[in-house]
Image (cartoon, helix red, strand yellow):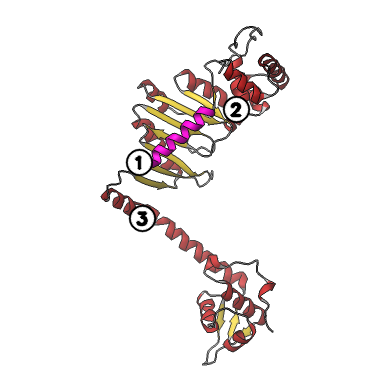
Amino acid sequence: MPLDPETDLDSDFEAVGIDDDTRLVYRYVLAQGTVRVDDVAQDVPLESTDPAGMLARLRAAGLINRTSGGDGEYTAVDPRVALRALTDRTAAQLDRVRATIPDLAGLFEQASDAAGSGAGVHVIDDPALIGAWYTRLEHEVTGEFMAFDRPPYVLADENPVEPLALARGVQWRAVYAAEVLDIPGAWAELRYAASVGEQARIARTLPTKLAIADRRTALVSSDLDALRPAAVVVEGGPLVDLLVAAFEAVWADAVEIPASDSLEGTAPPDRGPGKDDRALLALLGSGAKDEAIARELGLSERTLRRRSADLLRRLGAANRFQAGVQAVRKGWL
C-alpha cells in the first residue's frame, strides 16, 4: 500500500536523529508490519534513493527488527517501548553533553586569557553556585554595587552582607520589580534597606536579575526557571559596560523609594508633599496592585483608594501615570 507523505506532517523526529524521509519509512513499516527493501522503494515517495540505509538506521535505533537470511524482512517493534527507550537514551546523551560544559568553558576561558582578551565568561547552572557568586560580589565590591532585584530567588530573604558593604562606604543602588511588592513584608524590607543607606527604586518590570560590582564584574541571570536557574558571570570588557548602561537606563525611569513610609496625616493642597505622599507615589508609580500597596502600608483598600484619589486631585492628574509625571515636575520625586 503506497504511503501518502501528506498524511502525517505533524510529527518531527529530528530531535532523536530521524529525518523526514526516514520517518516516512518508519511509519510505513509500522503500517505494514513486515516489509522488504523493494517494498519501501516502490511504495514510499522518498527524496533519498537509499531505502536500505534508512531501514538500517531505524534498526540501529531499535525501532525495527530484521529477520535472518540474505533477503531478510524488516518487522516493527512496539513504538510504546522502542520510542520511549530511544528518547531516554537521547536524554541521557544530552545530560552527558551538559555535564561537559564546565570543562569546555574552562578551555574556552584559558584560550581567551591566552589571546589577551582581558575578559572572562562563566556559565553557571547550579543555584548554590549562583548564590555563592552573588555573595562573592558583595564581599569584593569596594566602590559601587548595582542590582536588578526580582523573583525567583536562590538565596534567603535576609541579606547580612549588604549592611557590611554599606558600612564600608559602598554606594549601593537597586531597582526592584513591582512584583516584589506582592510578597508579604517586602515593603518593610525595602524601607529598612533604604534606612541603612541603600538607594532603591521600583520599576514596573525587569527583564532579568543582575548584579554589578565596581563596574568590573557582572552576574546576570540567563534563565529564570525557579527549579533550574542559570546565570552568566562576565569579568571585564565591553559586555560589562553594556550591562552598566542597561542598568542606568532602567534606573533613570524607575520610581524612587522615599526614606519614610508613614501615612499619618496629609499635606494641605497648597503645600509640598507630606511624609506620606512620597511613599504612596512610589508604590502607585511602581505598578504594584492595590492589594499589595494597602497591605504593605497598613491600610484598607478603601482608605488607599481615598488617599490615592486625594493625591491625584492635588496633583491635577487623571490617572497614576499622570500623577507620576506631575510629581516629577513639582519636584516631589
Label 2 sits on residue? 286
* CA distance separating discs 1 and 3: 21 Å
At x 40% / y 24%, what residue is drawn? 171
Q: Nearer the viewer, residue 31 or 7?
A: 7
In x, y percent, where is residue 72? Answer: 55, 89
Range of residues picked out in magenta: 234-253
Q: Nearer the viewer, residue 153 or 313?
A: 313
In x, y percent, where is residue 258? Answer: 54, 18
In x, y percent, where is residue 56? Answer: 51, 80
Residue contact at pointers 3 and 2, CB within 8 angstroms: no
Q: On residue 237, which mark appears? A: 1
- Is the residue 62 above or below the residue 116 in the image? below
Badge 1: how crowded within 10 Å, few (<14), some, or many (20+)? Answer: some
Q: Amino acid at mark 1?
A: Gly
Magenta span: predominant SS is helix
Q: Secondary structure at mark 1?
A: loop
Q: Amino acid at mark 3?
A: Leu
Q: Nearer the viewer, mark 2 or mark 1?
A: 1
* CA distance separating discs 3 and 2: 42 Å
Q: Nearer the viewer, mark 1 or mark 3?
A: 1
Label 3 sits on residue? 104
Residue contact at pointers 1 and 3, CB within 8 angstroms: no
At x 46% / y 36%, what residue is drawn? 210
